[in-house]
Image (cartoon, rainbow, N blue to C red):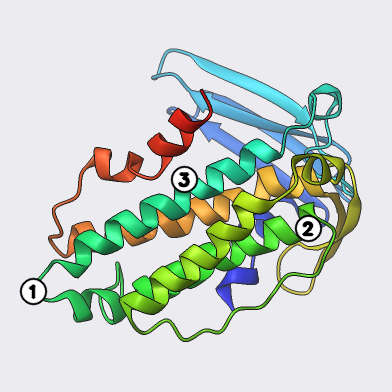
Amino acid sequence: DLCNQTSYWEDTFAGGWDTVVQCGDGGNQTTTSSSTSISAAASVTTSLGTAATKTVSAPISKKTYLDTKQTQNEPHNLRQQLLVLQGVLGTLTHILKKAEEQPNADTLLTTARLYEDMYPITDQVRCATQYSENILARLTGREPVTFDRDLGSYAKCYERIELVLKSLKEADKDVVNGHADVVAATPFGPGKVVDMKAGVWVHSIALPNVYFHLTTAYGILRKEGVPLGKMDYYAGFAPVALSQK
């Protein structure tokens, strides 16, 4: 199940590695090596045209990835991340309703894909809602509910989204923030598990996955001609933002 895979992170950071980053026309190169662990510094080099480059280094911890001094010293407000999830699911509902208005609405939901080996809209909804549930469960100290995979209609998609939204809105802020530093064994790619703080996992793995599935759903519908624009992408986030004033 691709909803539970993090192959990007595994390919990039799991085990010992030798990394060479080359920018521009080959004039700037940064190499980082570690034969046995990920305790060395990871270097990221970005090209600013052919004339300039900028290199930034950040420590990587094998046991708690991204557990830097900055992360440790910042106050925890993971409740805000649940508000972000509400925005994601609100936008997902909005673009589904736009799709439902189209003459080929049923095909859009169950068949249309960005590419033949990718999931259709129903699975994008499934993954976005399942990851949201996984985040909420970890931040409230319970086991996540594993949802049914059958989302073959718009009504079922809306029902699933509303179920998760209700749980997100009812979450206790203090309970959520209190779990930020709780370390737990965390899947880190196929066959790999690492100890990771809940807050680190949310920011570095879980939230990016939710965004991925929302953006992919948007991309599928736009590719199929559904009239969507950036304001449609914002549609779920704006009400949440305004409610926090």
Q: Residue furthest top?
A: 51
Q: Position of residue 51 (x, y in %)?
A: 42, 13
Residue depicted at x 36% and y 84%: 152
For marks 2 and 3, the one nearer the N-term is 3
Where residue 136 sits in the image (x, y, percent)? 70, 56
> Tag on residue 87?
3
Separation of residues labelled 2 and 1 (CA atoms): 40 Å
Please rate how many residues cluster around mark 3, counting C-alpha atoms within 10 Å: few if below 14, some from 14 to 19, many from 20. many
Horizontal relation, residue 243 to residue 50: left or right: right
Q: Which mark is residue 138?
A: 2
Q: Outermost residue toward the left?
A: 103
Q: In the rendered image, which quarter contains the N terminus?
A: bottom right
Please give left or right for residue 238 compared with residue 101 in the image: right
Going from N to C along the chain, the mark reached first, 2 or 1, is 1
Which mark, by number, is residue 103? 1
Q: How many marks?
A: 3
Amino acid type of the residue tagged 2 in the rendering = Arg
**Residue drawn at x 83%, y 53% as measured from the top left:** 16
Amino acid type at circle 1 is Pro
Neighbourhood count class around disc 2 (C-alpha, 10 Å): few under 14, some 14–19, many 20 upward: many
Residue 89, percent across and down? 46, 55
In the depicted structure, whether residue 52 falls above or below residue 200? above
Is residue 234 something one can see in this rendering? Answer: yes
User: Which picture quadrant has residue 105?
Assistant: bottom left
Number of the label disc, if any, that sits on residue 135: none
Label 3 sits on what residue type? Gly
